[in-house]
Image (cartoon, grey):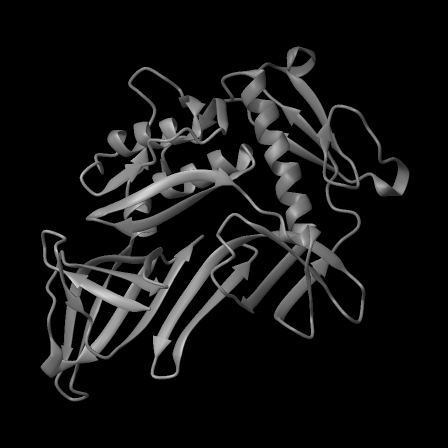
Amino acid sequence: MDLIYTDTNRTDVDIMPPYELDMAFGRDENDFECTIAIEDHCCEPQCCIYMSSANDGKNKWTEIGGIIDKIKLNTGSGDVTYSGRTWHGILGGKVLCPDNGQDYLVLSGDANEVLAFLIQRTGLGDLFEASSEKAGIKITSYQMDRYIDAYTGIRKMLKCAGAKLTMYYRGKKVHLSAVPMVDYSQDEEWDSTQISAQIGKNDFPTNHVICLGKGELKDRTVIHLYQDMRGNVSKKQTCFGIEEVTAIYDNANTESEEELEQKGQELLEDAFAAANAMDVTFKSDENYDIGDYVGTKEYYTGIQIREEITKKIVKVNRSGISVECQIGE
């Protein structure tokens, strides 16, 4: 694969001279450092870098890339380091706000059309472009979290629709599209002898939350929410006796019962995720995307967990290119 650098107008210039690259994107970081010999210095702030490859005469475009924000020279070691934001980090630098007079930004429509709307809303239309094709993935009255960064908000929105965000750089544009997420846990499973993993399981997390909203004493809004052993949330209790673990969610400032119920559901979902925690790193080819799901089994205890890929780390040095995927928050 070649690392291409552009000028400040995003016009391709050349292949990057011998370099080392450390790039991370996903749940955090979303930045990169690219180091070359000082005599090969060739870039300036606002230049872009991106990775592509040619296979059988066809170019393969990737999400590996970003914009250079900072340059650091080290005359002692004789190198120069370009650092900046990945494409994901540029999206993460924008905040999605409700319209004036509205509590939330509510979105509906084909997922790619919603992406196009959000690109324009964030003022990133000069760099980002949503696919003009229908995604076939429907967003229905999705309530965006208040004042959430655009990258996290888009990922959460698509996750609710069983989808993921894909992107690649080509022709001066970062192309975004929504596609169905892939559940690799159905066909392949990693075990703890193949990966670096920290796995925890708690069979009795909080599974009953009492949501307390507006009002006083007997007039106070009270909603009971329950979670079954599989993590499904409803108003029907399935765990009793010592299996029932109850918590209180107290917020008299909630605007509606729907908001109160949503916050209570999030509390239960977070408790379930923490009780079935998995922090895993594994080497990857390019088949896995952030938003896909993989499964793992711990060899000694037999614990099995299915989790979302939340981060990718790309490193390039003299030994070649390596891509790691991380699972867990």
Q: Nearer the viewer, residue 328 or 133?
A: 133
286 lies left or right of 202:
left
The location of residue 201, given as percent across then percent down, is 74, 56
Q: Is residue 154 above or below residue 182?
A: above
Residue at the farthest bottom position: 76
Asked if residue 80 is positioned above or below residue 11 in the image, the reply reads below
Percent from the top left, x then y, of residue 223?
68, 21
Quarter placement of the N terminus: bottom left
- Front residue of 321 and 132: 132
Q: In percent of the image, x 70 and y 12: which residue is there?
A: 218
Q: Position of residue 134 (x, y in %)?
A: 41, 28
Q: Which image quadrant is residue 33 in?
A: bottom left
In front here: 119 or 209? 119
Say left or right for 258 vs 48. Answer: right
129 over 326 or under it: above or below: above
Q: Relative to 207, is 259 on the left or the right? A: left
What is the count of numbered marks?
0
Extreme residue in the top direction? 219
Please state, as top left, top right, bottom left or bottom right, where the C terminus lies in the image.
Answer: bottom right
Along the line of sight, the residue nearer the viewer: 133 or 81: 133
* 329 left or right, relative to 312: right
Residue 274 at x, y percent in the picture: 65, 51
312 to 88, vertically: above or below? below
In the image, what residue occupies the spot 27% across and 48% down?
Answer: 90
